[in-house]
Image (cartoon, rainbow, N blue to C red):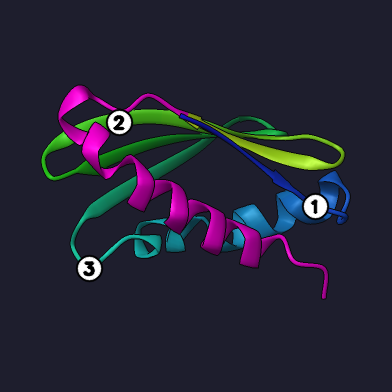
Amino acid sequence: MRIALPHELGREEVRRRMHEHAGEIGGFFPEGMAEVETSWPHEDRMDLQVSVFGHSVTGFVEIEDTQAIIEFELPMILSMAKPLIEKAVRKEGGRLLEKR
């Protein structure tokens, strides 16, 4: 699954917001659905390790000049939840990247 979220913030501001709100990512999903761990292998990439209903999903957020790319591979058993996950990512990720 690959989701591109456009932004007009610049990389530095997106990085700041991602660092500040990384602990909230699990809350993008219905209560108790996901646990999320993050790490930063370099300044423009946040790696994600997500546990969803006992299944492990790895992915990343890549920060670019005009968009943030969220990419992860869903196991077959979670593919039925793809529309719900994409909706949550677009809604909450878009909110995080709004120009204020």
| Label 2 residue SS | strand
Q: Which residue is mark 1?
A: 7
| Labels 2 and 1: the sequence-earlier one | 1
Residue 55's disc is none
Above/below status of 24 relative to 50? below
Q: Hey, what amino acid is under mark 2?
A: Val
Q: Quadrant of the N terminus?
A: top left
Nearest the eye: 59 or 38: 59
- Name the residue rendered at 34%, 47% in the picture: 36
Q: Hey, what amino acid is under mark 3?
A: Glu
- Name the residue rendered at 31%, 28% in the picture: 74
> Residue farthest to the left?
54
**Residue extent of the magenta highlight:** 72-100
Q: Position of residue 70 (x, y in %)?
A: 56, 36
Q: Residues within 10 Å of mark 1 (few under 14, many from 20)?
A: some
In the rendered structure, are the residues bearing label 2 and label 1 in contact, judged by CB atoms less than 8 Å apart?
no
- Name the residue rendered at 43%, 36% in the picture: 48
